[in-house]
Image (cartoon, rainbow, N blue to C red):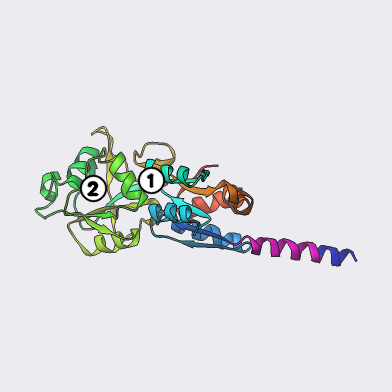
């Protein structure tokens, strides 16, 4: 009898988790983390599907009800908040990790460090040749995420000080596309989340004071010496709190936050 009761309870728990299969959608920066979290959660009997597309896409999906959780690398905009109010939606924000944004170039590029002002001038079009910043005589080709990306918005706000990107910037639909493009283009420059760094591109040391240049490492991001750091966020409708809470609790658990570190991001707990 006791074994039957235990079996029934376990079965009920499993069915309950299956009933609350969640959809997570949005930021490509958060994507690799959410995928790993979903894989680990599935081993506990839960079920979460994860897709990218950009922070704006995720928040739009939350607004139209086609996702349970929007993953975002930026905070909601005023226009998005206004739409939420118009639809009488109350949304909660949850920081699940911190991320450093790395500026990357082709591995053969001799330039290894840039100031924030130089980055602003490159991405807004004032500096157009690598020789202007100590490199070889080669035209600078600027890659960026598309406008629906939270990374695009964050870089514009924190690095460009809200100045517009140059008109000829090449917009990429995903972070992986930026890595691939820079890998194949010697004069290229772009930006990616810390978890996307690999040997196919070279990360640039950055300085905001013009004196101290710091590489985008996990340690430098944790201790605050690397200047381009941001929160990675989940947004969800409070009406679905009961459904999403088990997964969110797992994300913030010791196991979940260890996954954050393993992926290459900074835990919030």
Residue 18: quarter of image: bottom right
Q: Nearer the viewer, residue 77 or 106?
A: 77
How crowded pointer 2 is (Cα within 10 Å; few <14, some 14-19, many 20+) is rated as: some
Q: Where residue 149 appears, x then y in whole percent? A: 35, 52
Q: Which sits earlier in the primary sequence, circle 1 or circle 2?
A: 1
Q: Choose between 4 and 259: the one closer to the eye.
A: 4
Q: Nearer the viewer, residue 37 or 85?
A: 85
Pinpoint residue 56: horizontal percent, then vertical percent: 38, 52
Q: Is residue 17 magenta?
A: yes
Q: Which residue is mark 2?
A: 112
Q: How many marks?
A: 2
Residue indicated by mark 1: 100
Q: Secondary structure at mark 1?
A: strand
Most distant residue in the left direction: 137
Kindly identify the residue that appears in the image at 30 percent across and 40 percent down.
157
Q: Is residue 98 magenta?
A: no
The magenta-colored residue range is 7-21
Asked if residue 76 lies left or right of residue 15, the reply is left
Residue 81 coordinates in the image, percent (x, y): 43, 42
Q: Quadrant of residue 74?
A: top left
Vertical placement of 203 versus 222: above or below? below
Q: Position of residue 155 (x, y in %)?
A: 30, 45
Name the image quarter holding the N terminus: bottom right
Q: Few, some or many C-alpha atoms within 10 Å of disc 1 (few <14, some 14-19, many ≥20)? A: many
Which element carries disc 2, helix, strand or loop?
Answer: loop
Residue at 64% x, 50% y: name it: 242
Return the residue nearer the eye: 262 or 72. 72
Q: State whether the magenta stretch is mostly helix, strand or loop.
A: helix
Quarter containing the C terminus: top right
């Amino acid at each position: 009898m006791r074994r039957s009761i235990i079996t029934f309870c376990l079965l009920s728990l499993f069915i309950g988790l299956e009933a609350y299969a969640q959809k997570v959608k949005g930021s490509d920066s958060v994507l690799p983390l959410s995928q790993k979290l979903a894989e680990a959660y599935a081993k506990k009997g839960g079920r979460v599907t994860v897709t990218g597309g950009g922070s704006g896409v995720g928040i739009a999906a939350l607004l139209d009800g086609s996702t349970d959780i929007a993953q975002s690398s930026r905070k909601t905009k005023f226009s998005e908040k206004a739409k939420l109010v118009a639809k009488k939606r109350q949304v909660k924000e949850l920081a699940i990790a911190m991320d450093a944004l790395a500026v990357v170039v082709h591995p053969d590029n001799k330039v290894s460090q840039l100031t924030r002002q130089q980055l602003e001038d490159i991405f807004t079009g004032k500096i157009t040749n690598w020789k202007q910043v100590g490199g070889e005589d080669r035209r600078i080709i600027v890659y960026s995420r598309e406008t629906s990306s939270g990374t695009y918005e964050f870089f514009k706000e924190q690095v460009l000080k809200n100045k517009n990107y140059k008109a000829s910037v090449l917009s990429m639909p995903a972070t992986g596309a930026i890595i691939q493009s820079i890998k194949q283009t010697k004069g290229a420059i772009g930006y990616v989340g810390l978890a996307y760094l690999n040997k196919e591109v070279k990360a640039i040391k950055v300085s905001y004071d013009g004196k101290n240049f710091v590489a985008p490492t996990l340690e430098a991001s944790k201790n605050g010496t690397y200047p381009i750091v941001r929160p990675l966020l989940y947004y969800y409708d409070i009406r679905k709190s009961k459904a999403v809470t088990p997964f969110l609790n797992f994300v913030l658990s010791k196991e979940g936050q260890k996954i954050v570190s393993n992926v290459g991001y900074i835990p919030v707990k």
